[in-house]
Amino acid sequence: MSDANKAIEYAHKNHGRFTKELSEFLKIESISTDDAYKPEVEKAANWAADHLRGIGIENVKLLPTGGHPVVYGDWLKKPGAPTVLIYGHYDVQPVDPIELWESSPFEAVVKGDYLFARGSSDMKGQVMATLNAVESIMRTGDFPVNLKFLLEGEEEIGSLNMGGFLPKHKDLFKADFCLNPDAGAISADEPTITFGLRGLAYFEVHVSGPARDLHSGLFGGTVHNPAQALAELIAGMHDSNGTITLPGFYDSVRPVTDQEREATAKLPTTPESYLEQTGVPALWGEKEYTPALRTGSRPTLEVNGLLSGWTGPGSKTVLPARAMAKISCRLVPDQDPAVVQKQLIQYLEEHAPKTIIWEVKPLHDSPWAITDINTNGVRAMAAAMETVWGRKPLYRREGGSIGVVAMLQNICGVESGLVGGGLPDDNIHSPNERMHLPTWHKNMDAFIHFFFNMK
Amino acid sequence: MSDANKAIEYAHKNHGRFTKELSEFLKIESISTDDAYKPEVEKAANWAADHLRGIGIENVKLLPTGGHPVVYGDWLKKPGAPTVLIYGHYDVQPVDPIELWESSPFEAVVKGDYLFARGSSDMKGQVMATLNAVESIMRTGDFPVNLKFLLEGEEEIGSLNMGGFLPKHKDLFKADFCLNPDAGAISADEPTITFGLRGLAYFEVHVSGPARDLHSGLFGGTVHNPAQALAELIAGMHDSNGTITLPGFYDSVRPVTDQEREATAKLPTTPESYLEQTGVPALWGEKEYTPALRTGSRPTLEVNGLLSGWTGPGSKTVLPARAMAKISCRLVPDQDPAVVQKQLIQYLEEHAPKTIIWEVKPLHDSPWAITDINTNGVRAMAAAMETVWGRKPLYRREGGSIGVVAMLQNICGVESGLVGGGLPDDNIHSPNERMHLPTWHKNMDAFIHFFFNMK
C-alpha cells in the first residue's frame, strides 16, 4: 500500500470523528463583521490553533493584525522539499435572516448527505478537510513536504487588515505554493480549479434631506423624499440591458476573448442551471454574455442592503430624514477598487439632485486575481483530483472575491491553487448553509494525494 | 366677571397641575401600530376615561371596536342647547429612531416654552387642552352646552375600525358640531382653522426574485437584484417634475381654482418657511404649484420605509432574496383610496419586469374631507380665537389625514371644526416631539370661549 493510500485509509476510518470535530468548530459564532461577536471570533482562532497543535503542527501562534488575529503554524522538517502554505479563514457570515433557518445556525445537523450550519461550506468545513488530510498523513508516515498555515479571521469582511499585515511577515509566509480551499466546485461530480477571482469594492451610500423625520401629510410634496431619491440614484446605476452606468466603469475591463467564450461554453453552468440554483422567475443581465461569463468575467454592481424610515409592522406616515444603501461592485481585470470608488462618486456628482445631500462611505475592497495554471502546485492538485474523481478537473474563473489571493501574489510572491468542496447550492452567505459530506470526504483524499504529488 | 372669564381665571391658576396631569398621560406608551404595546394602549384608554369621570363627565365607558377601544362619555343636562362632540385620540406614533431622541420619549420634559414627549403635540396635549377647558367651566359655573366625547385609540393607524364602529353607534355620536383639535396651527401667532384634509392610501410593496439570499459573487450579474428592481419601480413613480406617474392618478383630482391659489398665497407658509421648517437643502415638487398648494391641494406618493438585505454594521456580500417598501399616497378631492390601489397595481403590471415577483399589500386608507366653514361651530371657534389672539384665524387645507372627519360627516352627519395647538416644528411623528406651552394655554382659553359662543 502506498503512503498516500495508508493516509487515505486512516482518513476513511476517522470520518465520524472528523465530523464531530468540525461540529465543535461550527459551534463557535465567529461572525467577523459584528463587534458583538469579537470574543467568539477569538475563540474560533484559539480552537483552530489548538487543533493545529494537536495534529503535530509546530510554532503555532496567534499573530495580531489590528483586527481579528491570524493563526500561524508550521512544520518545516523536510529541507530541500517544497513548502506548501495552507490558507483558510475561521470567520463566518452573519446569520440573518435568522427566521429562515430550518435548524439553529450554530448547531451542526446532518441530514442525508449534508451537514447544515453557518460556516459548514464557507469555510470551516474546507479548513478541516485540509487539517484532516494533514493529520491522516502525519499519523501514518512521514510528511512529504514542508507546511505553513495562514488562517485568518477577516475574510468575510474583505480581509481588512491583511494588506497591512502581510508586508510585515513577508518571510514568514514565503512558500512555493498556497493551497486555498475557499473556492468550491461546479458540482459534486466535477472537480474544479478556479484560476480567476473577481475583486470587490463595497460602499455605503447615504442620502439625507430633512433635518429630521417629517410628517408625510404636513410636508409631503414639498421635499425630495430621501428614500425616493436614493431609489432614483440606484435605478440609474444600470441601463435596461443591465450594463453599469458609472462613468468609465468598463474602461479598464479586459474584453472577453473568443478562447474564454469557448472554454466557458464547455462548463456545465447553463442558463437552466442558474435558473434552478437561484429560483428566480427569469435570468437577468447583459444579453451579450452568457450567465457563466457574467459571473466570472464581467463586473457587477449589486445592492446588498436598503434601509430607510419605518420598516416595522403596520403603517407610519413618516417622510424619512435619511436612507442608506449598501452597494458593492465585483471587479475583474484590470479594474482598480480605488478608481471604482471615484467613479461612484462621479456618478453621484453628476446625477444627485440639489434637493438632497449624499455621502459615500467605502467599507472595504479587495483586488481581483488570476492564477497561473501551469505552476507545479496547480498541476499537483489537478493530478490528485484526477486520481480521486477519475476525471480531469474543470478550470474556471469565479465570481467571488478572496482578497488574500492577490495579496499573497503581490506581497509574498506565492501563487495559490483555488479548490474546495463548496457546491453552488450550499447556500453560503444565506440561511441553511450546508456542506456536501461525500464531496468533503473526496476532497480530503485529493488533498492527501496533492501533498505526495508536490514532493 | 363673565362666566367665560371666571373659567379662564381657573384655568390660568391650574396651568401647573394641568402640565403634571398631561405628563402622567404621556408616560403611557400607547403605540397603536405595534401589538406589543396593546396593554399600554388599553391603559391610556382607562386613564382618559378616569379623567373624564374626574371632571364631571357621565356615562363614561370603553366601547369595543374590534381593535383598540373608543372612550365615550357625555354630559347632557342642557335640553334645548346644542350638543358638542369632542374628538381626540389617545394613541401615539412609534418612537423610532429612538437614538435621535434627546430625552426619553415617554418622560415629559419641559425646556423653555416646550414640553417634550411622544404624543405631546399629536395629540395627548390637545386632548388635555379640551378636557382642561371643560373642567375649568364645570368647576366655576354652569356648562353652557351639552357634551359628548369620542376618544379613539387607532388614529395613528388610520382609524382602522372606525368605519365599522360608527354605523353601529350612529345615534350615540349624533351632535351639532364636532370640535376636533387634531389639526394644528400655522404658527403660534396665527390661529388657524383647517377646512380641508387629505385622504390616505397606504401600501406595502414587496419584490422578490431568488428563492433565498444569494452570494453576490457567485450569482451577481445573472439575476435581477430585488432591491435594485424595487428601486427602479419606485424611481418610475414620479417624473422629473415630481408628478406621480401611476396611470390615471390625477383623473379625479379637482383642479386648483384661482380663488384657492389667491387664498393660499396669503398664508404665511412661504417657500422660505418650508425650507426653514424642514432643513432640506432645496425644496422639491411640482413647479406649477406653491409648496402650500402642494401640501394642501395636491396628492402625493411618499416612500415611508425601505428594507432589504444586510442593514447592520459592516459589509455582507449578499444578493438579497427580497425587498420591501412602505408607500403611501395623500389623496385630495375627489380621489378614492380603492381606485388608487388599482392604479398602483396597474403601474406595477405595466412596469415590473418578468425577472422579479411583486405583491401589493394594502395597509390602510382614509378618505379626504372638506368642512363647510359657514357652520355655527366654525363661526363660534373663529370668534373665540379672535378674542384670545386678537386677530381673525387663517383658513387652510392641510396635508394630513384624519379619517374620522369624513366618517363623522358621512355616517353621523356631524361637521367638524379642525383646530389645535400643534405647530409645524413640533416634530410630530419624529424624534423629539414637543408642544408649545404658551399656545397650549391659549387654546384652553379659546376652547372656553368657544363653548360659551356655542350656546
Image: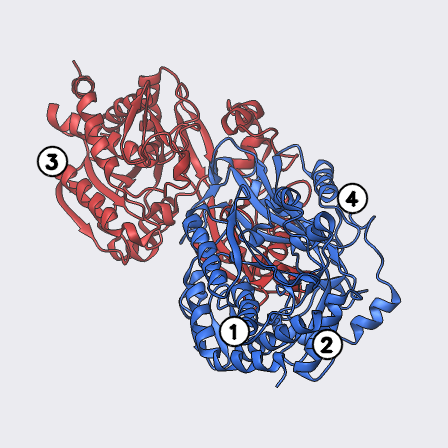
Chain colours: A blue, B red
Nearer to me, B297 or B210: B210
Q: Are marks 3 and 2 on the same chain?
A: no
Tell me which amino acid carries mark 1. Arg
Q: What residue sits right under mark 3 in the picture?
A: B54
In the image, which is nearer the foreground, mark 1 or mark 3? 1
How far from the left and from the top, in percent, is residue A102? 42, 70
Label 4 sits on a secondary structure element that is: loop
Q: What residue sits right under mark 2 in the picture?
A: A383
Tell me which amino acid carries mark 3. Gly
Q: What residue sits right under mark 1 in the picture?
A: A139
Q: Residue at x 43, y 50 (%)?
A: A37
Q: Residues within 10 Å of mark 2 (few under 14, many from 20)?
A: some
Q: Chain of mark 1?
A: A
Distance from Cα at disc 4 to Cα at disc 3: 70 Å
Q: Is residue A396 visible?
A: no
In the image, which is nearer the foreground, mark 2 or mark 4? 2
Distance from Cα at disc 4 to Cα at disc 1: 58 Å
In the image, which is nearer the foreground, mark 4 or mark 1? 1
Q: Residues within 10 Å of mark 1 (few under 14, many from 20)?
A: some
